[in-house]
Image: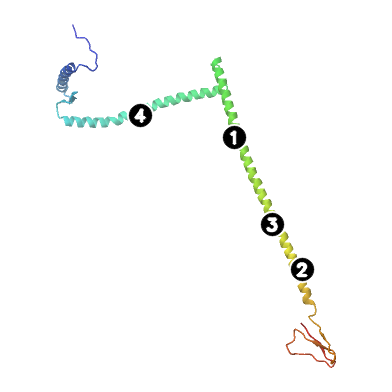
Amino acid sequence: MGRGKIVIRRIDNSTNRQVTFSKRRSGLLKKAKELSILCDAEVGLVVFSSTGRLYDFCNTNMKAVIDRYTRAKEEQQPVVNATSEIKLWQREAASLRQQLHNLQESHKQLMGEELSGLGVTDLQGLENRLEMSLRSIKTRKDHLLRGEIEELHRKGSLIHQENMELYRRVNVMTQQKVELCRQLQSCEARGAMDATKSCTTPYNFCIVQDANTPADLELSRSQEKEGEHIKTGAPELGFQLS
């Protein structure tokens, strides 16, 4: 009668666990030795017990076996990574193709095409989607229109302010022009008066009367030198210019 199968799980009883570890460790080391002899294989076996005790077996050199194992893993790693990456991208491409197919079918249905395979429920759902899309489109359009109107109002306000500023500047310039014209007219009038005065004869007559002497008139010109007098044979007349 053969032995019954046991459940492979951790043995809770520490004594039984230690006995099982000892038996199976011995069998594992024996199998490793037989494998190396029978198959001419390079075998390295390392076992740590639950208490931290080391058990190992190697038919050649443990360090050489570990170095060879490290190099082999490094050489195999890029191949494994490349294979995994290829499979990953293949799955991603298949998923994207399926999504593209679903989107194309949905687009055609939204455009009113290929509706023969849809039932009443599917058609009702499609109609609801179209109504929701239409409401979203109208809401977005209204939002954009309100924004454009507000922008136009803002620009109109700025233009109005600029017009008011230009109107104020025109008024200031008009007032300045009127003031300049008034000043110019005043200057022209003053110049005309000065010209009129310069054209008159610069003479000043002074009559000197004396009871004991005859009347004398003294004449003097501003252009003549000081002390010069013009005498005539007539009674003395003096013209004095002041």
**Labelled pair 2, 1 in contact (Cβ < 8 Å):** no
**In the rendered image of this protein, does residue 139 appear above or below residue 12?**
below
Q: What residue is disc 1 on?
A: 144
- 146 to the left or right of 222: left
**Labelled pair 3, 1 in contact (Cβ < 8 Å):** no
Mark-to-mark CA distance, 2 and 1: 67 Å
Residue 184 placed where, x, y %? Answer: 73, 65
**Residue drawn at (17%, 31%), measured in percent from left and top?**
63
4 or 2: tag closer to the N-terminus: 4
Mark-to-mark CA distance, 2 and 3: 24 Å
Name which residue type carries label 1.
Answer: Leu
Residue 29 placed where, x, y %? Answer: 15, 21
Name which residue type carries label 2.
Answer: Ala
Answer few, some or many: residues within 10 Å of disc 2's Cα (few below 14, many 20 plus, some between 14 and 19): few
Determine the secondary structure under disc 1: helix
Q: What residue is disc 2 on?
A: 189
Q: What residue is disc 3 on?
A: 173
